[in-house]
Every structure is written in C-alpha cells, then in structure tokens.
Image: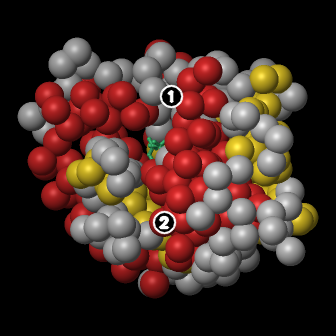
C-alpha cells in the first residue's frame, strides 16, 4: 500500500569538496568530502504515487518542472520503484528556500528531500545510511543532506560503501560552533551544470589527479581539526580546498570558471577581516556566491561586514537538522 509522503531536507555546504566522479552511473565520487548542513535553506517535497497516472509529473516552487528536471526526477523514481517492486507513477511537488542551480546547494536539499519522501511513499524501510546512498543517486551532495551538522561522505568503492554519516562536534554552541554567512551575489542559474563541469574536469584537467590525492588528505586533516575543536585549522583547510577545487576546473578545456569579479572581491574582504582580527574563511561552489565560515559568536559581525551597509544580501546560517519525514508514508 502506498500513500503520499512529505519530507524536509536542509542544504549543506562542503568544507572539503566533492568534485568529480569515479563512476557516473552509481554517482560514486572520486574523493571523500566533509560538509556543514545549514538551518537557513531547506526543501520540502511531497511524493504522491497515483495508480491512475500514466507518467511522473512535478512542480517546483509551484511551477511545472522543466523537461530536464522531470527527466532527473523520473530517473530517480525509477530507482525507487525498482527497489520497492512498484510500477506506480507519482506526482512530485517541491518547495525550496534555496535559489535553484546557483551553487547554493539546491540539488543537495532537493534530492535528499525527494529520497526521504519517495522512500516513505513507496513503503521502503531504509535506515539513514541507506537513505544517504539513495539520495546520492539523485545528486552526489544530497548524500550529505540526510544528516544535520557536520557530515562526512565516505567516497567508498561501490554502492554499498559510498555513504555519508554525521561527525560529532558540529553542534551550535559546542567547542567548534561552526556557522556560515552566505553572500548572495547572483541567485540566477549557473552557466554550466556541476554534472557537466565535473565530467569535463575529470576528462581534461591535468590537475585532477593531484586534486583527488590532496582532498583525501584534507578530509583526514579536517576531521582531526574537528576532533580538536580547532576552527582556525578547519577554516584554513576549507578555504584552501575550495581554491584547489576551482584550480582543477580552471585547468579543464574549455575551462570552467564560476567566479566573477564580485567573487574575488569577497575573497579580498574575507582576507581583510582576518587581518583585522575577525576569524573567517571563504568557500565557493559551482557558482559565483561565497560562503563564509566563522564561529557562531562572530556570525553577526561577519555578516554585517560582508553586507556592505545592507546593500548586499547575506544570509546567516547555523548548523541545520537531519532529514525528516513530516507527513504520510506507506500504511
Ligand atoms: O551534488 P552536485 O552534483 O550538485 O555537486 C556538488 C558540487 C559542489 O557543490 C561544488 C561541491 C560539494 O561538495 O558540494
């Protein structure tokens, strides 16, 4: 018996990045990664299997999904149906507080919420690790949005060993007390999808092998810093790791460049804030926006400094919660 189900998942921002797959079909990443789930952005998704529907349909923020979006959702539901032994099509309705496709982790929260809602609606009884593996198949970074706080995604070598899990120490108000100021420079869709940009990087960037080697080391060093409650070490590693990710994609042919002059301007500001004694570190994903890691107690000051007298949109975020199913599920 299937029923409508709704799930809520929060966005996450990687401190050690996932960039490049070792297996496209299974969405196995080339490296492990580490992220912080944020309270500020989330997606709420309802999946309603319908015995009378001839195909899957969907809405995003109240508008019909584009053909490309429907194809991705359908492919994901095919996987859920094969696991559940069901042939029912469904409608998928998703509302997100994250601007879509702007390098603000919309696919992470979106596919984690879809995984949670679809698993419940089709009656799959999955533990959080299995949900993380399922979400990974929709969008790699979604594997991490199944969990709140700090999260490590183990690259693994096959479907069973590539999953995310929470890392203790990421709680608000704890010794590390991580927080983020998200500087929204451009909330429009990105010029090239992360999927396509990763493929191009893996295939053509001569820097890619060094990127994967050094990121595995970064993840281990960052986990040490988390255990030690050492935010300055974690932050410095995170900023360096983000710059290395962008270096590897700049090395692709044709090059992939998500930065604008404004992006570089924020990097300068973050450096200046540090020089002035306000500890904070920048990270950048597949878009021009900059996310700035700092301690929770410094968040108001960092956000205020980056907002340029209120003329620029800065969203403040603290550690967010686990994925949760809020309504429905198989009876
Ligand atoms: O999950 P995807 O395919 O949207 O890729 C995410 C890639 C980055 O956001 C740039 C890095 C990361 O680890 O989240």
Viewer-side label of 1, 2: 2
- Residue 82's x, y, as percent? 53, 59
Query: What residue is disc 2 on?
Result: 133
Whole-number angstrom distance, CA of label 1 to CA of label 2: 25 Å
Q: Is residue 189 above or below residue 318?
A: above
Q: Secondary structure at mark 1?
A: loop
Query: What residue is disc 1 on?
Result: 287
Q: Going by the image, does 251 lie left or right of 312?
A: left
In the foreground, 177 or 27: 27
Say if residue 116 shows up in the picture: no
Q: Going by the image, does 234 lie left or right of 6?
A: left
Q: Name the image quarter holding the N terminus.
A: bottom right
In the foreground, 312 or 20: 20
- Residue 187's x, y, as percent? 67, 24
Q: Is residue 119 above or below residue 102?
A: below
- Residue 127's x, y, as percent? 61, 80
């Amino acid at each position: 018996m299937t029923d409508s189900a709704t799930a809520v998942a929060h966005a996450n921002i990687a401190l050690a990045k996932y960039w490049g797959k070792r297996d496209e079909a299974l969405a196995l990443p080339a490296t492990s990664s580490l992220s912080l789930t944020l309270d500020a952005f989330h997606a709420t998704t309802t999946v309603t299997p319908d015995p009378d529907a001839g195909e899957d349909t969907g809405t995003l923020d109240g508008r019909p999904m584009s053909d490309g979006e429907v194809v991705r959702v359908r492919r994901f539901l095919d996987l859920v149906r094969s696991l559940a032994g069901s042939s029912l099509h469904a409608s998928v309705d998703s509302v997100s507080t994250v601007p879509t496709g702007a390098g603000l982790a919309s696919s992470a929260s979106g596919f984690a919420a879809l995984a949670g809602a679809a698993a419940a609606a089709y009656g799959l009884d999955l533990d959080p690790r299995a949900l993380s593996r399922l979400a990974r198949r929709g969008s790699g970074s979604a594997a991490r949005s199944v969990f709140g706080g700090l999260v490590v995604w183990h690259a693994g070598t096959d479907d069973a060993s590539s999953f995310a899990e929470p890392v203790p120490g990421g709680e608000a108000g704890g010794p590390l007390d991580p927080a983020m100021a998200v500087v929204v420079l451009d909330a429009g869709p990105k010029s090239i999808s992360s999927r396509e940009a990763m493929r191009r990087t893996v295939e053509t960037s001569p820097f890619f092998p060094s990127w994967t080697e050094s990121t595995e080391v970064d993840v281990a060093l960052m986990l040490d810093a988390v255990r030690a409650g050492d935010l300055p070490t974690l932050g410095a590693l995170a900023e360096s790791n983000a710059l290395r990710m962008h270096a590897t994609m700049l090395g692709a042919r044709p090059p992939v460049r998500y930065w604008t002059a404004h992006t570089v301007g924020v990097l300068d500001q973050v450096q200046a804030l540090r020089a002035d004694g306000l500890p904070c570190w920048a990270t950048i994903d597949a878009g021009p926006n900059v996310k700035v890691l700092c301690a929770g107690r410094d968040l108001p000051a960092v956000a205020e400094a980056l907002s340029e007298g209120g003329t620029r949109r800065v969203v403040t975020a603290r550690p967010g919660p686990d994925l949760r199913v809020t309504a429905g599920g198989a009876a």
